Image: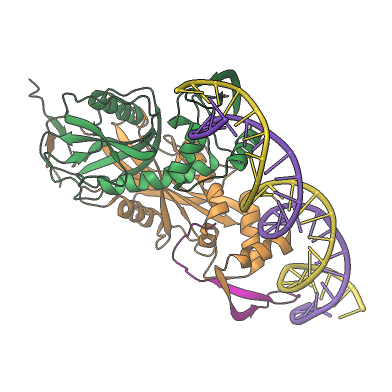
Chain colours: A green, B orange, C yellow, D purple
Amino acid sequence: MNSQRYIYPYPHPAVTTDVVLFTIQMDTLSVLLIERKNPPFQGMWALPGGFLDIAEDLESCAKRELQEETGIKGIYLEQLGTFGAPQRDPRERVISVTYFALSPSDHLCPRASSDAAEAAWFPINELPELAFDHAQIISLARQRLIAKLGYSTIAFQMLPETFTLSQLQSVYEVLLNEALDKRNFRKAILARNIIRETGETARHGNHRPAKIYQVLNPRQVEIIK
Amino acid sequence: MNSQRYIYPYPHPAVTTDVVLFTIQMDTLSVLLIERKNPPFQGMWALPGGFLDIAEDLESCAKRELQEETGIKGIYLEQLGTFGAPQRDPRERVISVTYFALSPSDHLCPRASSDAAEAAWFPINELPELAFDHAQIISLARQRLIAKLGYSTIAFQMLPETFTLSQLQSVYEVLLNEALDKRNFRKAILARNIIRETGETARHGNHRPAKIYQVLNPRQVEIIK
DNA sequence: TCAAAAGTGTTAGGCTTACACCCATGC
DNA sequence: GCATGGGTGTAAGCCTAACACTTTTGA
């Protein structure tokens, strides 16, 4: 099919993108992985990602690979870092530009596809053995995510468009791995003027209904304070 | 000399590294640039950098190119981000992995070399027109540098091994572009327990000599608070 | 003795943290 | 009416920010 050959006067590395996609499931921070169906590392789990098309933007590549391999699209992506240790891929020299991404927990239907045997969520503390240097990439992504909680509106990317303050607090508690005071949390969030009441309430369960909020600037992550 | 050809079954981009090297000269934040002596952008100024050797680590490449083009070595480097817009280089698809770096102002003797017509420091607010997307890269580097001032020990990378508190304060003032209160600044720095007195004093000029300090962990940038 | 930069504490106000009870609903 | 999570205010302490004068030296 493609018998063309691409010729250069000096050696070129391959470039890939990989995405660390986080979500929270059952109060647990989880990462999306795909099972590799081809060598190298056949049968092992890896981050969704793949080779950059020659005319394609880096972030577009990350989004495309994520959608091809898992069916997930339309989410927040941020560049994490670039990994290029000379032997990180046994096939050839590969430079991987990595992104991290967050998904609300109600978007959760990764599907297997042509490039991946299977896609599945793994709790961050129960990761399988990972292909390439992907364990290191996930570790960096987690650090960054937690750091950004403190000075950005990134947490909202893990919630649906509308949410209750309890849901928001739960996101912070899971990521920070500590309990927060309800009154102080609400005071701090409301003082930032980044969310507003929708006027709706959620009556789920045998207790008082919760006010439903939404972010003022939904599709963007802002730096605060 | 090199008539070899490198052949791949699908197109590969080229990968470069570029370095944004900052220093402070005469109370002004400055960036090191080189004048391009070859096309594209011949005669324009650009960041020091160049193509990745196929078996070379990314950071090693950045350090090597910096040394080759400017003679500067042994400084702190941190990955900044990767730039890969499809048309950013008119020759071929080029992905640039960028680093930012800081140098004490007493290291300042960039020299021209084989790859660059000339190397020179430019005040950040008086940059010439720049090749490629290098203006954007410098802008990002500056933001990162200023952000890291607040939560890391990065400022010490702009000073020699030993320094006075006034010198340190001057670094912060130049980067933040605002005057700081001397007493509050000293209190805050000393409270962090990251520097110690050497016992020496600097008697430069007709005024009281300043105590000389040094960083406890010199060669590393730490995240604080 | 004068000029120049080094060095040094205190106070007020704001922000952070700790803490406990009533409310609205479903069963 | 009771169990469940939703919703609310205050007080103490800590941290931040404002502020001025004395010290040491070289000329």
Would you identify the image quadrant in which residue A71 lies? Answer: top left
* Percent position of residue A222, x then y: 54, 33
* Percent position of residue B89, x then y: 35, 32
Q: Is residue A5 visible?
A: yes
Q: Nearer the viewer, residue A121 or B131?
A: A121
> Above or below — where is B16 with respect to B90?
below
Q: Nearer the viewer, residue A26 or A81?
A: A26
Q: Which residues are magenta?
A: B198-225
Is B214 colored magenta in this rendering? yes
* Percent position of residue A93, x then y: 19, 44
Secondary structure predominantly adopted by residues drawn in magenta: loop
Q: Nearer the viewer, residue A144 or A162?
A: A162
Q: Residue at x 10, y 25 (%)?
A: A4
Q: Residue at x 33, y 52 (%)?
A: B59
> Above or below — where is B28 with respect to A209?
below
**B3 with respect to B34 (left or right):** left
Is B175 colored magenta in this rendering? no
* Percent position of residue A190, x then y: 63, 33
